[in-house]
Image: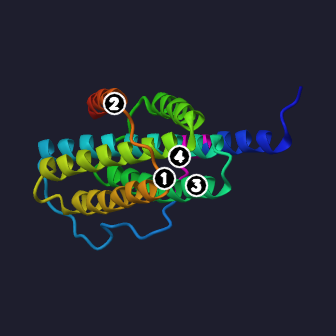
C-alpha cells in the first residue's frame, strides 16, 4: 500500500536536504560573524588546532541538520514542525560559517560526514517517534551539551584566532536560545541514563572528528 502523498513528499524533502547538506550547498542567511575580523598570524600548530576544533564544530552542525529535520519529519504538530525547521535554518548558518572558517584555515571537513549525518538522522527519528515532549527534551539536552562544548573550544582556541572565536561565540548564543525555546515549548527532561549515553556519543564524535 502506497504511503500518503504528503508523507512521500516529506521524505523526499528530507532526502533533498540531506544531499544539499552533504554537498556543502548551505548558504548563510545571516552575516558571517568574523567578516570584519582582520586575519591574525598563527604558526602551524595553532592553525592545525583551530582547524581541528572547527572541523568538530562543522560535524556538530551536520548532525544538527540531521536531527532537526528528522524531528520535523516525525512530529504531527504543524507548529512544532515549523519550530524544528526554523531551528535547522539557524543551524544552517552555523554550518556555512564553520565550513567557511575551515576554508580560511586551509583545513578540511571530516571524512566521515555522511556517517555522522546518517547516525544523527536515526537518533532524531527515534526521539521524534517517542513523543513530541521527548523530542523537545532531546533538543534541550543536546543544545546544553553543545553550549558546554563550545565553551571548551573558546578556552582552547589560540588567543589570536579572533575569527574562530567570533564564530563560536555566536553559535553558543544561538544554541542557548534553541534550548530555551524548546524548554518553553514543553520539553520533557530526559532520564539520567539517556543524558549519559548522549554525552558518551558526543565524546566519541568529537574525539574522532578532531582527527578524521
- Range of magenta residues: 18-26
- Mark 4 and mark 1: Cα distance apart in space: 16 Å
Alpha-carbon neighbours of circle 2 within 10 Å: few (<14), some, or many (≥20)? some
Check disc 2 and report its element: helix, strand or loop: helix
Q: Is residue 155 magenta?
A: no
Q: State which tag comes first along the sequence, 4 or 1.
A: 4
Query: Label 3 belongs to which residue?
Result: 85
Query: Label 1 belongs to which residue?
Result: 186
Query: Label 2 belongs to which residue?
Result: 205
User: Is 63 in front, or is 96?
Assistant: 63
Q: Residue at x 47, y 59 (%)?
A: 90
Q: Is residue 24 magenta?
A: yes
Check disc 1 and report its element: helix, strand or loop: loop
- Mark 4 and mark 3: Cα distance apart in space: 7 Å
Q: Residue at x 70, y 45 (%)?
A: 13
Residue contact between numbered discs 2 and 1, judged by CB atoms under 8 Å: no
User: Is 113 in front, or is 143?
Assistant: 143
Image spot of residue 106 (x, y percent): 30, 47
Q: Quadrant of residue 71?
A: top right
Q: Where is the C terminus found, in terms of image quarters?
A: top left
Q: Residue at x 48, y 46 (%)?
A: 136
- Of labels 4 and 1, the one closer to you: 1
From this view, report whether residue 184 is shown above or below residue 125.
Answer: below
Q: State which tag comes first along the sequence, 2 or 1.
A: 1
- Of labels 2 and 3, the one closer to you: 3
Q: State which tag comes first along the sequence, 4 or 2.
A: 4
Query: Label 4 belongs to which residue?
Result: 68
- Mark 3 and mark 1: Cα distance apart in space: 17 Å
Alpha-carbon neighbours of circle 4 within 10 Å: few (<14), some, or many (≥20)? many
Amino acid at each position: 500500500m502506497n504511503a500518503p502523498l504528503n508523507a512521500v513528499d516529506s521524505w523526499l524533502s528530507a532526502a533533498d536536504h540531506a544531499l544539499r547538506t552533504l554537498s556543502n550547498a548551505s548558504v548563510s542567511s545571516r552575516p558571517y560573524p568574523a567578516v570584519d575580523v582582520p586575519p591574525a598570524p598563527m604558526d602551524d600548530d595553532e592553525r592545525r588546532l583551530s582547524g581541528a576544533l572547527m572541523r568538530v564544530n562543522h560535524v556538530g552542525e551536520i548532525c544538527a541538520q540531521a536531527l532537526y529535520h528528522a524531528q520535523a519529519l516525525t512530529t504531527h504538530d504543524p507548529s512544532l514542525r515549523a519550530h524544528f525547521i526554523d531551528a535547522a535554518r539557524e543551524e544552517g548558518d552555523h554550518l556555512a560559517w564553520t565550513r567557511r572558517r575551515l576554508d580560511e584555515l586551509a583545513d578540511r571537513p571530516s571524512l566521515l560526514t555522511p556517517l555522522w549525518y546518517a547516525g544523527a538522522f536515526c537518533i532524531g527519528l527515534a526521539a521524534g517517534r517517542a513523543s513530541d515532549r521527548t523530542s523537545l527534551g532531546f533538543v534541550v539536552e543536546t543544545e546544553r551539551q553543545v553550549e558546554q562544548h563550545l565553551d571548551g573550544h573558546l578556552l582552547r582556541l589560540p588567543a589570536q584566532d579572533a575569527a574562530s572565536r567570533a564564530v563560536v561565540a555566536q553559535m553558543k548564543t544561538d544554541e542557548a536560545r534553541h534550548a530555551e525555546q524548546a524548554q518553553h515549548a514543553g520539553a520533557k527532561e530526559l532520564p539520567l541514563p539517556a543524558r549519559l549515553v548522549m554525552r558518551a556519543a558526543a565524546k566519541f564524535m568529537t574525539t574522532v572528528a578532531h582527527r578524521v
